[in-house]
Amino acid sequence: MEGELLALTYGAVVARVLKDYERTDEVNAQLDKMGYNVGVRLIDDFLAKNRHGRCKNMHETAEAIQSAFKQYINVQPQVGKWNDAQNSFSLTLDTNPLTSFVELPAELGGLCYCQFICGILRGALEMIQLETKVQIVADNLKGSSVTEIRVSFIKKLVDALPVGED
């Protein structure tokens, strides 16, 4: 029942954002922004509950993300498709609880329905000083058999101190 409630609640949120904005690129940006704000807060909860130490590399980061998916939405994505530099990977969801009851009409072909997840990941990773690019590269709502989310490391962020402070 939890998955159904999540899917229906998220569907209502997407429907509301679709009513508020005219273009799908604006809707995608809003879903990403909403997810980012959730991710910024969710990382604290995740770290407090798991007592997870600092990840030493992107492989450990991917494992932590995988366990967070299991903890929060009860699915475990497959981690793979690493690039040669080992700083970019894909999370593949065979089943996506957010899309359980969804069919996208043709006029919404540009909608990234699960952009919210990308925002959550980006926000959470930014809070642990990792700037990333997160995007949906395969979508089960658009003919793919899976949902694939690509996470690419951009740079390590450093805390900026105000001018004059060391």
Image (cartoon, rainbow, N blue to C red):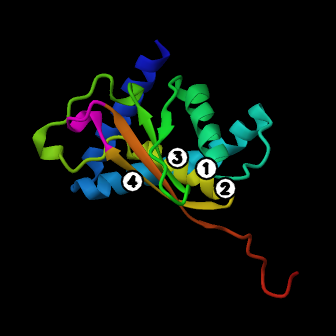
**Element under label 3?**
helix
**Element under label 4?**
helix
Dot 2 or dot 4: first in sequence order is 4
Residue appearing at x 38%, y 40% in the figure:
148
Dot 4 or dot 3: first in sequence order is 4
Inspect the image, locate mark 4, and give the three-letter code of the amino acid beneath it: Gln
Q: Specify whether residue 139 is painted magenta.
A: yes
The CA distance from mark 1 to mark 3 is 6 Å
Q: Say which residue label 4 marks.
A: 30
Inspect the image, locate mark 2, and give the three-letter code of the amino acid beneath it: Met
Would you identify the image quadrant in which residue 64 lies? top right
The label shown at residue 124 is 1
Q: Specify whether residue 152 is painted magenta.
A: no
Inspect the image, locate mark 3, and give the three-letter code of the amino acid beneath it: Ile
Where residue 119 sits in the image (x, y, percent)?
Answer: 48, 50
**Foreground disc of the pair 4, 1:** 1
Dot 4 or dot 1: first in sequence order is 4
Query: What range is drawn magenta here?
Result: 138-145
**Foreground disc of the pair 2, 4:** 2
The CA distance from mark 4 to mark 1 is 17 Å
Q: Say which residue label 2 marks.
A: 127
Q: Say which residue label 3 marks.
A: 120
Which of 10/111 is in front? 111
Dot 2 or dot 3: first in sequence order is 3
Where residue 152 sits in the image (x, y, percent)?
Answer: 49, 57
The reply to whether callout 2 and callout 1 are in contact (CB within 8 Å) is yes
Task: Assess disc 1: are there few (<14), some (14-19) or many (≥20) residues with their C-alpha within 10 Å of its C-alpha.
Answer: many
